[in-house]
Image: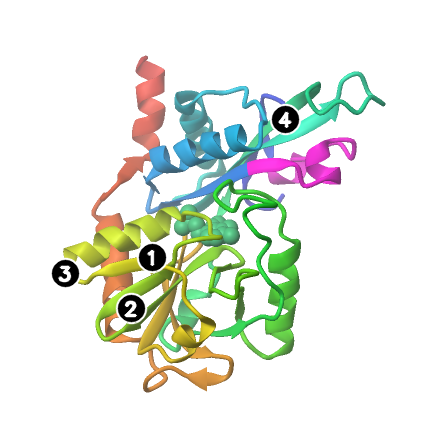
Amino acid sequence: MSEGVAFVDGHYVGRDEAKISVFDLGFSRSDVAYDVVSTWKGLFFRLDDHVERFLASAAGVRIRCPYGAAEIGQILAECTFRAGLQDAYVEVLVTRGQFQPPGSRDLRHTTPNFIAYAVPYVWILPPELHASGAHVWIAPTPRIPDAAVDARYKNFHWGDLTRAQLQALDAGADVAVLSSLSGHLSEGPGFNVFFVKDRTIYTPGTNVLRGITRRTVFELAAEVGVEVEAGDYEPDRLREADEAFMSSTAGGIMPITQVDGRSLGDGKPGALSWRLRELYWAKREAGWHGARITDLLASRRTA
Ligand code: PLP
């Protein structure tokens, strides 16, 4: 059996037993709200923030979540503990479920389906490539506009991200960055984007998921005395940046060294990007915004 434990239909099962019905609207219409949190060396990072965003995503797309924040935290801790993982990628999702009664089509009458799982930690850019940095491709496919699918609610409408990522791979790059329909930088498949010009950090402010790692970058930048500005930026700002990086639960802070086949600066990870990356991991390992898996479970067992 492959590594990982899932919580499905109220039971903990091995990764290979984690299945849903083909009649679930989560499958047939990508009708899902989800979130991903990680653990590193046995510590969750910003668990409460992720659970809060998850519940906001579910409410935002009008899917009723059958569990509250405290229960969700416990379920995620239990999955991770049972999987025996210290460094884990921990996903929680709620699908709209199946129409009730079967064969009807009233979206207000469905049975939401809550699922969670813990699997080994996932990297958007493998750690051995961090020292050389990511090569990104500003894809021709635009990001779905917020007016259609609000990117603040973490969702499975990945058609644009997937199409853009395939274009990036065809171009020989590692990852895609998408622009909005209005032609401003937005985000990539699973990450937020930052660039640095003259010691100020910039990040797209609209048509993006408000990443928890993105929020963390704001905090780390304040700590090192560097300003971060969120706004609408033309793709050329990224192409002409001094340095750039991406942020995600799946990999933390990861340097970008090439955009559309051209190197940024000297082609090595920028000094500020690297400093933030190092600080992120050092602070995480020291327990910053952390909750230990075993403490979460102990608090339930004594409750
Ligand atoms: N943008 C998108 C589309 C994502 O799917 C993700 C993460 O999964 C992010 C940004 C980064 O968000 P976070 O830092 O909360 O992982």
Give x and y (percent) for residue 296: 33, 27
Residue 242: name its quadrant. bottom left
Residue lying at 31% horizontally and 14% vertically, measured from the top left: 302
Task: Give neighbour class at mark 4: few <14, some 14-19, many 20+ (Cα, 10 Å).
Answer: many
User: Does 51 appear in magenta?
Assistant: no
Pointer 4 residue:
113
Real-space Cα separation, disc 3 to disc 1, in angstroms: 16 Å
Horizontally, is 261 left or right of 16 in the view? left
Q: Amino acid at mark 3?
A: Gly
Q: Which mark is residue 225?
A: 3
Pointer 1 residue:
230
N-terminal label among 3 and 1 = 3
Q: Which mark is residue 273?
A: 2
Q: Secondary structure at mark 2?
A: helix
Q: Out of 296 and 263, give the one closest to the viewer.
A: 263
Q: Out of 110 and 282, give the one closest to the viewer.
A: 110
Residue lying at 46% horizontally and 65% vertically, measured from the top left: 125
N-terminal label among 2 and 1 = 1
Q: Amino acid at mark 2?
A: Ser
Range of residues picked out in magenta: 15-33
Give x and y (percent) for residue 54: 47, 34
Residue lying at 16% horizontally and 55% vertically, measured from the top left: 223
Above or below 107: residue 212:
below
Task: Give neighbour class at mark 2: few <14, some 14-19, many 20+ (Cα, 10 Å).
Answer: many
Q: Amino acid at mark 1?
A: Ala
Task: Quarter of the image for the C terminus: give it.
Answer: top left
N-terminal label among 2 and 3 = 3
Above or below 33: residue 88:
below
Above or below 290: residue 232:
below
